[in-house]
Amino acid sequence: MGVNYTLTYTIGTIAALISLVCWYYFVVGATRMVRVIRLGQPDGTRSGPFVPRMRTLVTEFAAHTRMNRVKSSGRAHWLVMWGFLIGFLAWFEAYGESFDPYFHWPVFGAWDPWLLLVELLGLGTVIGIVVLMVIRQREHPRRADRVSRFAGSDFAFAYFVEGVVLIEGLGVVFVKAQKIASGVEDPPIWAAFATHFIAKGLPASLTLVSIFAVVKLLSGMVWLLVVGRNITQGVAWHRFSAFPNIYFKREDDGSTALGALRPMMSGGKPLDFEEADPETDVFGAGKIEDFTWKNWLDFSTCTECGRCQSQCPAWNTGKPLSPKLLITSLRNHAYAKAPYLMAGGSTDMAGDEVGITGDDAEARLAAIPQEARDEAARALIAEAVDGGVIDPEVLWSCTTCGACVEQCPVDIEHVDHIVDMRRYQVLIESAFPTELGGLFKNLENKGNPWGQNSKDRLTWTEGLDFEVPVYSGELGDTEYLFWVGCAGAFEDRAKKTSRAVAELLHIAGVTYTVLGAGETCTGDPARRAGNEFLFQTLAAENVETLNGVFDGRPAGTRKVVVTCAHCFNALGNEYPQVGGDYEVVHHTQLLNKLVREKKLIPVAPVAEDVTYHDPCYLGRHNKVYDAPRELIGASGATLREMPRHAERALCCGAGGARMWMEEKIGKRINLERVDEALSTAPTKIATGCPFCRVMLTDGLGARKDEKAAAENIEVVDVAQLLLASVRRAVVQPPGAEAAATGHDLDADTPTEDVSSGTPLPEGDDAPDAAQSATRPAAAGNDAEVTGTVEAAALPAEDAEEGPGSTTTTAAGGAGPA
């Protein structure tokens, strides 16, 4: 059987010429993408160290550690990825095969292990992409609307990419099978366990080898051509941009961009407010060019997979925010505006052109495409009807829970981007929700969000049958500073947590002291709301106080215990940015340690069915999942996990300063979370954060008013469960008998009976009673809910990874699922 070299050389030459054109457009597109990304602000924090960053990169792509958080699509994508990374050798082999059917790579091309690898790569690519195609159709938004993580994604381009990958995989398989059918190759059955049988159905034709090779080659070439001319299609470009995006992620140790917020940067360095100049320095992000080059790389890398969207509490309750659509909107705006920026265009804060000036300014502006000039005229933050890129409702719907960052397989840093835009709106535009005005005023004048007097910071100690030590200038041999926090000092429900923790520390014999009036707010709500200046002011005051308290103590002995997840995060992760380095532990961690050391001995099991809500700033932001669950188990309660728990837990709705903002659109997030908690049929809903407790209590109260929840269900802190189980081992204070049984754990005062330090509006503008007391102006209204997700309604792909809503597990020693 001979080869028709005239035919094979003809089709090979045509394919090669076509490929040159395709490669040209791809290189042009890639070059333009790099030039566009470099338009961002400098950021010198991403360059090193090399070894840990490279280790993270290799781990994340080789083991697919982040993709495999959704195992079905993660495993399928792993097959496709390796089919691309190694299969390119089989793809490039098509250049030779299109000219000569007998062609193979020198040295290893006829080696049986290589032929086996080609078999695995080709079949793996086909199987992987078919699974991904099925998943996309199974979760198509035509069926599920907001439940679908693909809602809003570019389906046309996704179908194109899927089709190309499928043809490439089939090309590898059929070229090999045709070589076997034509006698070009005769591998052992173990090296051709599938193509051996496919070959039996193919004719013996050497020409067909070259034709299949051309199909394999041109499928990839068409992909190069199309993506080279469409550089905003992250679903295709992430094949390349994901690698640098992972390498240059914020944390060089490989952890996600959670915990501390990225400092406000200008010119590649943290902004010093004392020396900052609004005329030259960047205050957050008010224009797309205010974002750094790494931010632009983030925008370019989004694959539109929608994992962030599927986990977002705002999106899942009918709000306009989708982390995915926010990133793609910024990407599209950035690339559309890029020609204007590349030409030197720039405007000042008043919107006047300052970049293109001089006698030839008009001609230079005219040379810029009209589309780019129109895009440059758009405001980054403005209502859609006014041409804004990001609607204010989108920007302020974020709770900064970090679910988007946690789930993103390519390490996009959504929360940092959102807070940077908020910073500009607050500090430069003074454009923020009106409710935040009261919050900022209270923080500035009173040092706490509720506007209470500092002298009242010790009222939570009233009624305790022991004296709470207050710092008086000497720390002595005291082991811990107990940072009570604003909620623990002023919010009536959080005071119960403070008392429970103080009593447990007293029982265990742990030496501690509190600051009392010396405390002020850590600044967490100010920072998440974008008021970086106020945060810096409050943080500097606290750091001065704490450094004075710990003066003379070496590192490792500056121990602080906190009950508030937000204080825990601020003191432990963000204060090092402003000169405060302390060993900060959450009360659940310390109490769990004391139980293990037998300093706290539970003797009266709390016979309750408990579901645990993971606070975002304790769990996702700081990875504390085990300690609270182990304490629930130690108390004798039975833990019933919610469908969304641990790293996939749904936010309560309080973060990002949302606790002080009205929730006007869609279903209230706290109601969504309470509904999910109730689906586990608990008698107690436990948590480890006062903000969460407020939100869940309000939501539970609303459901009780609707007769949708039993009156005996209550929200408690984990510390209260533990206290109820150890009280029989000590002399009980009056009224402790009921608590020792696990019932009536200092039942929360009805919300409407709790006073607030911030005056509330009256009349039609007043929040309803179920929301008003401890979350000033945070109630919103009972807007009609459309397109919301029911408590236990998860996308099929997401639901497969977690236990069902009625799963009951023993809590002792239980960690995150």
Image: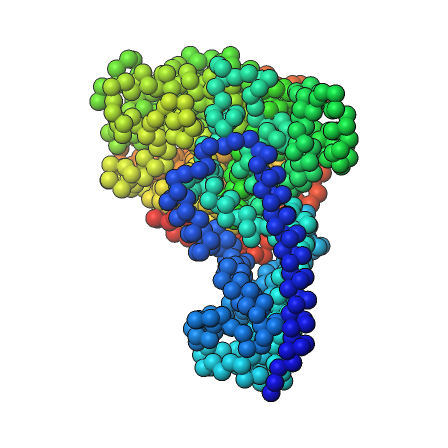
Q: x, y percentage for residue 64?
A: 47, 55
Asked if one can make out residue 230 in the rendered structure from this viewpoint, the answer is: yes
* Relative vertical location of residue 679 with respect to residue 726 in this rendering, above or below: below
State the residue in front, 535 or 230: 230
Identify the residue shown where x is 39% and y is 52%.
810
Identify the residue shown where x is 35% and y is 30%.
584
Q: x, y percentage for residue 331?
A: 64, 40
* Relative vertical location of residue 452 with respect to residue 197 in this rendering, above or below: above
Q: Quadrant of residue 361?
A: top right
State the residue in front, 180 or 626: 180
Asked if one can make out residue 320 in the rendered structure from this viewpoint, the answer is: no
Q: x, y percentage for residue 220?
A: 62, 61
Q: Residue furthest left?
A: 477
* In-image side of 817 versus 157 (left or right): left
Colour scheme: rainbow
Q: x, y percentage for residue 63?
A: 44, 56
Identify the residue shown where x is 66% and y is 57%.
22
Q: Quadrant of residue 670?
A: top right
Figure disc tally: 0
